Image: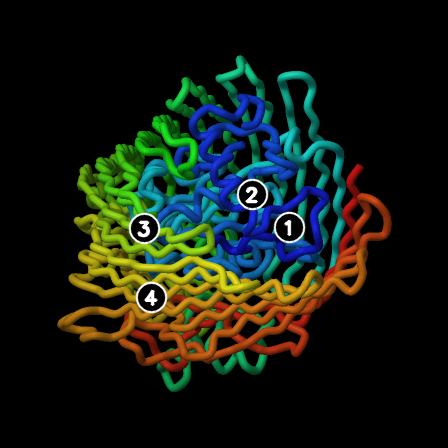
């Protein structure tokens, strides 16, 4: 069962939604689509096994199978952790973010950093947990093609959930078929099309903290072709003193039925994302002045207190642009499906870190090739008998590192030409054994290369520093020996998996699986600026000593992270209650950890020897009446070191042990609906791997309402954090923390939003 069970939690859509009595009929219809029984003009951009480029809904005995329905049936049939979020699930949500979109998906943990259009920490089953910012661990896709760069890194803020019709979530090995062999899995944002969402729609909303957002969308179908274009712009001043953000994006796609059996879709998009990095606060300041920003360590008796970045002086900020263009083409020949894709992205990313890391400017392009083949001879099976895929991504980028001199670009201290490629080959079977049993063996091969050519050239690297007692007073400049940061690494692995599912009837499925995963490091893991402090640039660990010998970079010889995972689960219905329950245990070797010291400065990445990840992912949806529905998403995480010589069996920092999201929605009248939501972290979360500093538990409550004024005109509003709780939505993750360390990122205070959506 997916996030929303078998029906939307909002009011009834104009489209007729399937219930449990129609499950067998829908399953068969979806299988017919895989086998070629669906006309080519019935094609979307799902990444589920055996999917094609569907364009319009399929109607079977009065039931319209939209993109959501087809994706849901396939996801429910996979023997592993999956989820789905549909547009209807987000009714009444204002200031919609990635964390809002994924909050109701068990097993996906999103921790906001600065609110608005920023870089929340997304982790699934602990993959990529300890990156600051998070830039790996999950394969992010749009219409089946990656947002990630060739080395696996990604900028999460480039994904816009408002531009998606549905969001598909593949946890763990279920994403292998998409070319994601990592522990975490994949998230696919499926765009609406001119056929699935025809007409014109305009949206305008505003609210607290200077939030303003507008969007305009137009789509339609003419003969064998359809098209859709959407423009979004949002900005906000933010909850904190230095916390503004702005995002502009345009996304378009055009589909064409070439023949009855061949369909193609072209798409293009551009996103311009900018946000201030408000940075962390010490716990005492979080509790007393949560909307402030940190001014760096304060010297007391010659010793620094409240260590952390000086946001007031360094003005950290990120400005990223990405342009993408691509095509997906599908062809069905009887029981055989061929699906191919090509995509190109160009990314320009300017990240002004605090002074220890400097200003990192990266620009480059990535080319993606995707091919899939499925064989589905059984029209009653939701999954193909044979499912194979290929994904190849190659890319290069120029990276330049400049000193952050009081928020301005200082001298160049490093430059690199970065190249990467990732190839994954996947082959799997879904073998019916009779009596409701299906055996799903598969194997995935991955080959990755990471190459850095140091193009800096000079014999020394410049350094700057400020007086720790007077942090705006600049000390004499210095320099350190440059050294060579070049490297050339290759990683490969074979990752088999075996799943077994049992479906006694249409309402229940139980499954178990064992799998291997593989995740090579990114360039950000392999090339790190080090030996800086809150008052000095990289390579200057002692601010008063301009020529103290130290390296400005660390290029660790890292191994790829691998894991063996067992999981088991049950999806089913008990009357009006739908349940999706999965538990897993992973034996992880060489887990990639990105470490920071007690000041927040980077220590670079390391491989942990052995770690253990245990978790429970529970989703419950209850349609208590025609008007009232509720949904619970519960995630349990117990991630630990295993016999580590320094950290023992400590918990891995940054992973909340219990994550609870509870929502309820009630249709007061045919036109008016109200909702409530609870986000609750009931236990402490370690900030450091030594487990000496913790984030406190917290809970926030939201209220929402939407009112249909007239046909196609909806007013909606939301009150967030109505009790104005003061809490840390996330933290930095460090190895050894101090009690007074600036490590806590405040969540937004009480806020009110309202919006108007008009469709015609």
Q: CA distance from mark 2 to mark 3?
A: 23 Å
Of badges 2 and 3, the one in the foreground is 3
Q: CA distance from mark 1 to mark 3?
A: 30 Å
Query: Which label is found at residue 245?
Result: none
Query: Which label is found at residue 615?
Result: 4
The residue positioned 62% from the left and 68% from the top of the image is 677
Q: CA distance from mark 4 to mark 3?
A: 20 Å
The residue positioned 31% from the left and 30% from the top of the image is 390
Tell me the element at label 1.
Answer: helix
Q: Does residue 540 sit above or below 342 in this rendering?
A: below
Q: Does residue 517 sit above or below 533 in this rendering?
A: above
- CB contact under 8 Å: marks 2 and 4: no
What residue occupies the far top of the structure in this picture? 259
- Rate crowding at label 3 as few (under 14), some (14 to 19) or many (20 or more) other CA atoms within 10 Å: many
Q: CA distance from mark 1 to mark 4?
A: 29 Å
Sequence order check: which comes first, mark 2 or mark 3?
2
Mark 1 lies on residue: 88
Whether residue 415 is visible, yes or no, is: no
Out of 271 and 484, give the one closest to the viewer: 271
- CB contact under 8 Å: marks 2 and 1: yes
Q: Is residue 426 left or right of residue 17?
A: left
Sequence order check: which comes first, mark 1 or mark 3?
1
Of badges 1 and 3, the one in the foreground is 3
- Rate crowding at label 1 as few (under 14), some (14 to 19) or many (20 or more) other CA atoms within 10 Å: some
Sequence order check: which comes first, mark 2 or mark 1?
2
- CB contact under 8 Å: marks 1 and 4: no
Q: Is residue 224 left or right of residue 632?
A: right
Residue 673 falls in image quadrant? bottom right
Q: What x and y, as percent, mark residue 758?
A: 79, 44
Mark 3 lies on residue: 501
The residue positioned 34% from the left and 42% from the top of the image is 152
Mark 2 lies on residue: 68
């Amino acid at each position: 069962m997916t996030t929303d069970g078998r029906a939307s939690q909002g009011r009834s859509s104009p489209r007729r939604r399937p219930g449990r009595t129609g499950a067998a009929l829908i399953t068969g219809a979806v299988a017919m689509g895989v086998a070629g029984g669906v006309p080519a003009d019935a094609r979307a951009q799902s990444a589920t096994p055996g999917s094609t480029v569907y364009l319009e809904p399929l109607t079977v005995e009065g039931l319209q199978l939209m993109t959501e329905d087809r994706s849901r049936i396939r996801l429910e049939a996979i023997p592993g952790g999956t989820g789905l979020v549909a547009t209807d699930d987000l009714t009444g949500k204002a200031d919609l973010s990635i964390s809002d979109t994924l909050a109701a998906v068990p097993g996906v943990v999103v921790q906001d950093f600065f609110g608005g259009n920023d870089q929340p920490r997304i982790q699934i089953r602990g993959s990529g947990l300890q990156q600051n910012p998070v830039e790996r661990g999950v394969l992010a896709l749009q219409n089946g093609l990656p947002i990630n760069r060739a080395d696996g890194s990604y900028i999460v803020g480039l994904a816009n959930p408002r531009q998606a019709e549905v969001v598909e979530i593949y946890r763990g090995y279920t994403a292998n078929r998409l070319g994601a062999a990592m522990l975490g899995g994949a998230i696919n944002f499926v765009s609406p099309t001119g056929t699935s969402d025809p007409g014109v729609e305009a949206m305008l909303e505003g609210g607290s903290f200077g939030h303003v957002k507008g969007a305009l969308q137009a789509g339609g179908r003419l003969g064998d072709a359809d098209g859709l274009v959407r423009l979004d712009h949002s900005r906000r001043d933010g909850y904190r003193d230095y916390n503004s953000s702005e995002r502009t994006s345009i996304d378009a796609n055009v589909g064409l039925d070439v023949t009855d059996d061949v369909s193609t879709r072209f798409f293009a998009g551009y996103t311009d994302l900018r946000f201030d990095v408000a940075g962390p606060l010490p716990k005492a300041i979080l509790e007393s002045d949560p909307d402030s920003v940190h001014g760096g360590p304060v010297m007391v008796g010659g010793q620094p207190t409240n260590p952390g970045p000086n946001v007031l002086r360094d003005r950290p900020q990120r400005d990223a642009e990405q342009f993408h263009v691509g095509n997906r083409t599908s062809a069905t020949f009887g029981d055989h499906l061929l699906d191919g894709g090509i995509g190109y992205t160009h990314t320009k990313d300017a990240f002004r870190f605090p002074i220890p890391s400097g200003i990192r400017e990266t620009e480059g392009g990535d080319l993606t090739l995707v091919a899939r083949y499925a064989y589905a001879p059984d029209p009653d099976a939701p999954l193909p008998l044979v499912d194979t895929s290929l994904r190849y991504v190659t890319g290069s980028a120029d990276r330049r590192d400049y000193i952050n001199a009081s928020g301005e670009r200082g001298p160049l201290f490093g430059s690199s030409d970065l190249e990467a490629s990732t190839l994954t080959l996947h082959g799997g079977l879904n073998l019916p054994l009779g009596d409701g049993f299906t055996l799903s063996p598969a194997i995935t091969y991955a080959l990755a290369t990471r190459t850095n050519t140091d193009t800096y050239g000079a014999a020394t690297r410049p350094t700057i520093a400020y007086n720790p007692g007077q942090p705006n007073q600049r000390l004499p400049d210095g320099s350190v020996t440059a050294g060579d940061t070049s490297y050339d690494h290759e990683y490969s692995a074979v990752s088999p998996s075996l799943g077994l599912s049992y479906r006694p009837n249409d309402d229940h499925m139980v499954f178990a699986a064992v799998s291997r995963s593989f995740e090579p490091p990114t360039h950000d893991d392999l090339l790190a600026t080090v030996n800086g402090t809150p008052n000095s640039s990289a390579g200057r660990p002692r601010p008063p000593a301009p020529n103290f010998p130290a390296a400005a970079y660390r290029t660790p010889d890292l191994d790829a992270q691998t894991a063996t995972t067992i999981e088991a689960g049950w999806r089913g219905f008990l009357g009006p209650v739908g349940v999706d329950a999965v538990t897993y245990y992973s034996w992880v070797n060489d887990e990639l950890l990105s470490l920071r010291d007690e000041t927040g400065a980077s220590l670079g990445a390391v491989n942990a020897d052995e770690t253990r990840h245990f978790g429970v992912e529970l989703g419950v949806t209850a349609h208590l009446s025609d008007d009232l529905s509720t949904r619970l998403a519960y995630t349990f995480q117990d991630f630990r070191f295993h016999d580590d010589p320094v950290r023992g069996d400590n918990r891995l920092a940054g992973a909340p042990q219990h994550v609870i999201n509870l929502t309820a929605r009630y249709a007061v009248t045919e036109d008016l609906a109200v909702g409530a939501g609870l986000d609750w972290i009931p236990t402490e979360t370690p900030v450091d791997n030594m487990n000496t500093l913790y984030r406190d538990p917290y809970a926030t409550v939201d209220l929402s309402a939407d009112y249909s004024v007239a046909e196609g005109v909806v007013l909606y509003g939301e009150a967030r954090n109505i009790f104005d709780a003061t809490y840390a939505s996330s933290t930095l993750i460090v190895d050894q923390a101090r009690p007074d360390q600036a490590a806590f990122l405040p969540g937004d205070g009480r806020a009110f939003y309202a919006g108007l959506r008009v469709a015609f």
